[in-house]
Every structure is written in structure tokens, then in C-alpha cells.
């Protein structure tokens, strides 16, 4: 689960390249552009969370309680960042239409585009919660 954002960034970069050539101004291109923008600039938030998850997972054998706590912290922070990304897109899509002369880095998505944008991040949150349940459900021998 820790490396899922990296795989998603690689997938969306390829998808953006293909869709930019095939469907120049479609909703899918705008959604992929949002994904790339958020993942590139959000890497500063996601990288430490992924590092915490990996460090916690690798230390489970030596230090079970501490490893679980570190991995859980990384999973919770990754989920919080994913929810932040999702909420920023939904808030932007529900806001007023921007001034046509206003320069924006990204197109304003309609609400169904925002739903498409948030779907992978919500799946990431669901996967993190499943990993958290599996992480704390395993019984370790007494330390």
C-alpha cells in the first residue's frame, strides 16, 4: 500500500500522454491533468507518509508494537493526504465559475469529473483502512 501513489502517478502520466493525443479536450484529459498536478505537487506530502509506512513494515519483525505504530501512522497520514486532495477538487468544482480572463493552471471540473478524480484516492483510503485492520488484527507473541 505504501507505494500505491507512485504507481498511480506513473499510470496517470501514461494515461495523460495517450489521452492528450487521442482526446484533446475531453473530460478524461482534464481529470488526468488534475491527477498529475496533484501527485507532482503533493509528492512533498506523500513521500514522508510512504516512508513511514515502509519503515514501519520493515521493522515489524524486530519491533512488533513499534513497527505497527509507525506503519499505522504512515497509513493514516497517507489517507489524510488523499482526502485532502479529494476535498480540494470537490471544493473547486462546487465553487463559482471562474472569470474567463482568470488564468488557471487546471480546468474547473464539473461534479461528475470531480467524482472521477476522487475515486482512486477514495480507493486508496479504503485500501489503507483494510491494511490497518490487517496490521492490528494479527496477534504477535508477547514481547
Image: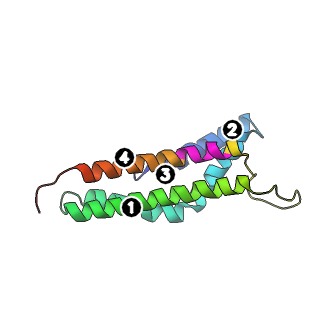
The answer to whether marks 2 and 3 mark residues whose Cβ atoms lie closer than 8 Å is no
Going from N to C along the chain, the mark reached first, 2 or 1, is 2
Left or right? Give the position of 130 relative to 47.
Answer: left
Residue denoted by label 4: 130
The secondary element bearing badge 3 is classed as helix
Q: Few, some or many C-alpha atoms within 10 Å of disc 3 (few <14, some 14-19, many ≥20)?
A: many
Question: Closer to the camera: disc 2 or disc 3?
Answer: 3
Question: Closer to the camera: disc 3 or disc 4?
Answer: 4
- Identify the image quadrant of residue 104: bottom right
Which quarter shows the C terminus? bottom left
The answer to whether marks 3 and 4 mark residues whose Cβ atoms lie closer than 8 Å is no
The answer to whether marks 4 and 2 mark residues whose Cβ atoms lie closer than 8 Å is no
Identify the residue at horizontal 72%, vertical 52% (top origin). 93
Going from N to C along the chain, the mark reached first, 3 or 1, is 3
The secondary element bearing badge 4 is classed as helix
> What residue range appears in magenta?
114-120
Residue denoted by label 3: 5
Magenta highlight on residue 88: no
Residue denoted by label 2: 19
Judging from the image, the colouring scheme is rainbow
Going from N to C along the chain, the mark reached first, 2 or 3, is 3
- Identify the image quadrant of residue 20: top right
Amino acid at each position: 500500500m505504501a507505494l500505491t501513489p507512485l504507481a498511480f502517478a506513473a499510470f496517470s502520466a501514461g494515461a495523460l500522454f495517450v489521452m492528450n493525443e487521442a482526446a484533446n479536450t475531453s473530460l478524461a484529459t482534464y481529470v488526468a491533468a488534475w491527477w498529475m498536478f496533484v501527485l507532482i505537487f503533493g509528492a512533498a506530502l506523500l513521500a514522508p507518509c510512504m516512508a513511514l509506512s515502509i519503515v514501519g513494515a520493515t521493522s515489524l519483525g524486530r519491533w512488533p508494537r513499534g513497527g505497527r505504530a509507525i506503519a499505522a501512522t504512515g497509513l493514516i497520514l497517507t489517507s489524510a493526504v488523499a482526502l485532502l486532495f479529494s476535498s480540494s477538487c470537490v471544493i473547486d468544482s462546487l465553487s463559482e465559475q471562474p472569470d474567463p480572463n482568470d488564468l488557471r493552471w487546471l480546468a474547473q471540473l464539473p461534479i461528475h469529473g470531480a467524482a472521477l478524480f476522487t475515486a482512486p484516492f477514495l480507493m486508496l483510503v479504503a485500501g489503507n483502512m483494510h491494511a490497518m485492520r490487517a496490521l492490528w488484527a494479527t496477534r504477535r507473541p508477547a514481547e
